[in-house]
């Protein structure tokens, strides 16, 4: 059959779908699906044996291009806009898509979801692109890039800020600085707002205000059927609960409304400790974890192996211009430590990133524990050194994230954590490497470190059998039960109510 006839046949089916997308609820979903399937199956019968996967998805991309307003755009391989749309911070979470779509408003997101849902085409939604896991915000299908949702609006009377879901936290902090307020957001430069807020959100302010999800007042959400909703705890209790930690299972969030907090200059920086002083830094971390109860203080300790060296970088933070005596004094007393701390503004402090070393591929995993004891910290150092040597020249890091036992108490019930009466804090395993041939070995190493940390914690008397894994840094194969525990049945029920056709199941990530 000629290419012209093929195009005509497909155009007929696609045009029907475009009109259906605009008619919305005036045309029943089963009729939309039937229209699509008729034309799509006929098209497959003519061309299936010659097309690549991207070629098969291309007609859907063209349908989207015809359906969206002029404010939005669809881009194809070969364009700079396409490359920017699908790119992530590392190559291991980037995937070649049939097209990249940049919606500019909720109405166009509605049209996109209706078309993709009817066509049953895989898709991905990228906010900041900071995930380390392939397929979580990437796809061989249709890639939705939220970069045009980049508006910010500060409401001084309600002490909230409305944040577009395509923004990084860096832009939010800079926007709020003139108002002398800030938010509970990312701790590393480049982290996106959307994924961070959908997965929980550990911040420098967590000891004061809880998880970032505990500071959310409202969402603008496009449901899988295209309905645009303003979701609050009062208007949609179940949906509000599910969005707080339930990831991308309930639709596409276009705007977050988040509480702000007064912000002065802060004090902080990095104290770098050589391997010769491991005992001293382990003791300082363990003592800090048990003795310091000041909610303005925060500590992350990075155990790093790279290029033959093991070091510990203690990232210290105090949410005021000067910390009181005694908070971090034991770190200052460590021999041979390099101390780089000062009073600075919150924006400047948050422009730091992860160490500028490693490879183009990254994986995360998390081990939730109860207490950073000396034996556990020794195991963190030992595993970092051992696997760093085995995986060289890969970059291996384990981050000990110390929080107060009360940090879950600041918020109401949410998808994560499943039990706010229980306390755990993460060891974040981070490995960066270059060769794709080493991927399985690296993932096995991350799993082995998690297993070792759990064994040591249990020997140390810690009951972590039901401790929940923090979704934002959990391994890609983490069972849902390990993140959501007793909340899983409720989340699945909410999912069935708001997404009975499992449209969001076409997107990657942790699926309910």
Image (cartoon, rainbow, N blue to C red):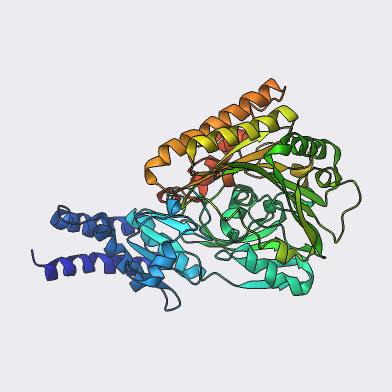
- Labels in figure, total: 0
- Quadrant for residue 170, please give it: bottom right
**Residue sitting farthest toward the left:** 1
Q: In the shown orientation, is residue 439 left or right of residue 469?
A: left
Which image quadrant for residue 280? top right
Front-lying residue, 408 or 395: 395
Q: Residue at x 35, y 71 (%)?
A: 79
Which image quarter is the N terminus in? Answer: bottom left
| Whether residue 398 is visible | no
Who is closer to the viewer here, 101 or 460?
460
Q: Position of residue 274 (x, y in %)?
A: 69, 43
Front residue of 210/386: it is 386
In the displayed orientation, state which residue is furthest to the right. 325
Against 477, residue 268 (above or below) is below
Asked if residue 289 is positioned above or below residue 347 in the image, the reply reads above
Q: Is residue 223 above or below residue 468?
A: below
Q: Residue at x 72, y 70 (%)?
A: 176
Q: Residue at x 27, y 66 (%)?
A: 14
Residue at x-position 79% and y-position 70%? 180
Query: Which residue is situated farthest in the bottom direction here?
Result: 70
Q: Residue 406, percent across and down?
A: 79, 41
Picture coordinates of residue 332 (x, y %)? 82, 47
Tell me if residue 85 can be seen: yes
Left or right: where does residue 13 sit relative to residue 356? left
Residue 502: % across, % down: 43, 48
Q: Nearer the viewer, residue 294 or 261?
A: 294
Q: Is residue 206 above or below residue 426?
A: below
């Amino acid at each position: 059959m000629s290419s012209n006839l093929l195009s005509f046949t497909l155009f007929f089916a696609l045009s029907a779908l475009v009109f259906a997308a605009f008619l919305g609820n005036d045309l029943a979903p089963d009729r939309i699906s039937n229209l699509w399937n008729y034309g799509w199956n006929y098209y497959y019968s003519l061309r299936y044996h010659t097309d690549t996967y991207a070629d098969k998805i291309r007609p859907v991309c063209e349908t989207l291009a015809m359906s969206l307003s002029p404010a939005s755009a669809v881009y194809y391989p070969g364009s700079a806009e396409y490359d920017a749309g699908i790119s992530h911070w590392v190559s291991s979470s980037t995937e070649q898509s049939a097209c990249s779509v940049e919606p500019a408003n909720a109405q166009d997101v509605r049209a996109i979801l209706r078309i993709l849902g009817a066509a049953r085409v895989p898709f991905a939604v990228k906010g900041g692109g900071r995930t380390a896991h392939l397929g979580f915000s990437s796809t061989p299908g249709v890639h939705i890039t939220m970069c045009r949702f980049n508006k910010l609006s500060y409401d001084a009377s309600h002490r909230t800020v409305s944040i577009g879901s395509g923004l990084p936290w860096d832009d939010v902090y800079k926007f709020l600085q003139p108002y002398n307020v800030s938010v509970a957001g990312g701790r590393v430069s480049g982290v996106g707002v959307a994924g961070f807020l959908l997965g929980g959100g550990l911040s420098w302010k967590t000891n004061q205000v809880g998880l970032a999800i505990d500071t959310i007042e409202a969402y603008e959400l496009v449901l899988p059927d295209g309905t645009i909703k303003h979701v609050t705890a009062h208007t949609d209790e179940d949906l509000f609960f599910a969005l707080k930690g339930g990831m991308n299972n309930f639709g596409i969030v276009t705007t977050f409304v988040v509480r702000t907090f007064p912000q002065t200059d802060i004090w902080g920086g990095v104290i770098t400790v050589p391997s010769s002083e491991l005992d001293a830094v382990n003791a300082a971390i363990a003592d800090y974890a048990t003795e310091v109860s000041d909610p303005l203080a925060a500590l992350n300790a990075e155990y790093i192996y790279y290029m033959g060296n093991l070091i510990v970088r203690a990232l210290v933070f105090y949410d005021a211009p000067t910390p009181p005596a005694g908070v971090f004094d034991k770190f200052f007393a460590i021999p041979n430590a390099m101390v780089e701390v000062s009073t600075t503004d919150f924006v400047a402090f948050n422009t730091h990133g992860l160490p500028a070393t490693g490879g183009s591929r990254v994986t995360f995993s998390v081990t939730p524990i109860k207490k950073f004891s000396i034996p556990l910290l020794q195991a963190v150092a030992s595993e970092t050194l051992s696997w760093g040597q085995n995986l060289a020249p890969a970059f291996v890091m384990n981050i000990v994230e110390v929080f107060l036992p009360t940090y879950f108490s600041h918020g109401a019930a949410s998808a994560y954590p499943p039990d706010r009466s229980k306390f755990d804090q993460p060891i974040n395993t981070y490995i960066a490497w270059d060769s794709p041939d080493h991927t399985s070995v690296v993932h096995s190493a991350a799993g082995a470190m998690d297993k070792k940390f759990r064994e040591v914690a249990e020997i140390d008397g810690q009951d972590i059998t039901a401790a929940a894994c923090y979704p934002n840094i959990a391994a890609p194969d983490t069972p849902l039960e390990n993140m959501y525990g007793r909340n899983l049945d409720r989340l699945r029920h909410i999912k069935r109510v708001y997404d009975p056709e499992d449209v969001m199941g076409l997107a990657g990530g942790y699926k309910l």
